[in-house]
Image: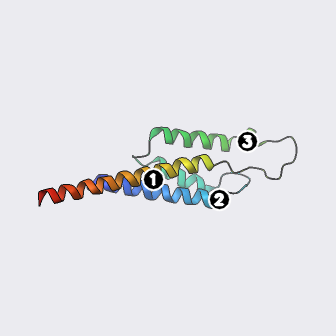
């Protein structure tokens, strides 16, 4: 129980921090910042993050770092338009899922303790 609870808590906390970093930077800018890349790379190291979410993050950063995708033929208002809304939504859903699973785990543990008493 303790190890699983710790994994859910660490994952939920990391997701919350990553979403906060991305939301704080939810504006048009020249390129992805180091803080954004750092927060996402920390998420990829957590064991509870599904592989499909890790692949989506890799694909997103491959697109963002591709300089050809950012070239335009005429001057634009912004060099790069913020496109992380889909990633923010995915991370928020993962956060909610982990919090729900942690809560279910806590309820199960409480019921188990009460059953033994």
Viewer-nearest residue: 110 or 13: 110
Viewer-nearest residue: 61 or 11: 11
Can you identify the residue that label 1 sits on? 96
Are circles 3 and 2 on residues that touch, CB within 8 Å? Answer: no
User: Can residue 67 be seen?
Assistant: yes
Rendered location of residue 63, percent (x, y): 66, 40
Marker disc for residue 57: none
Can you identify the residue that label 3 sits on? 67
79 left or right, relative to 113: right
Viewer-nearest residue: 102 or 79: 102
Rendered location of residue 39, percent (x, y): 54, 55
Q: Is residue 99 above or below residue 63?
A: below
Label 3, label 1: how far apart the Cα atoms are? 34 Å
Q: Within 10 Å of the Cα at label 1, are there few (<14), some (14-19), or many (20+) other Cα atoms?
A: some
Viewer-nearest residue: 112 or 17: 112
Can you identify the residue that label 2 sits on? 25
Q: Of discs 3 and 2, which sits in the foreground?
A: 2
Q: Of discs 2 and 1, which sits in the foreground?
A: 1
Residue in the picture at 48% in, 55% down = 15
């Amino acid at each position: 129980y303790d190890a699983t609870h710790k994994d859910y808590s660490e994952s939920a906390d990391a997701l919350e921090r990553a979403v906060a970093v991305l939301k704080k930077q939810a504006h048009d800018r020249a390129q992805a910042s180091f803080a954004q890349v750092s927060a996402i790379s920390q998420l990829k190291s957590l064991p509870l993050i599904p592989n499909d979410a890790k692949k989506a993050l890799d694909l997103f950063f491959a697109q963002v770092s591709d300089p050809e995708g950012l070239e335009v033929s005429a001057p634009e208002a912004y060099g790069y338009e913020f496109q992380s809304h889909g990633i923010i939504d995915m991370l928020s859903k993962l956060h909610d899922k982990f919090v729900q699973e942690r809560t279910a785990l806590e309820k199960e543990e409480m019921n188990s303790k009460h059953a033994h008493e």
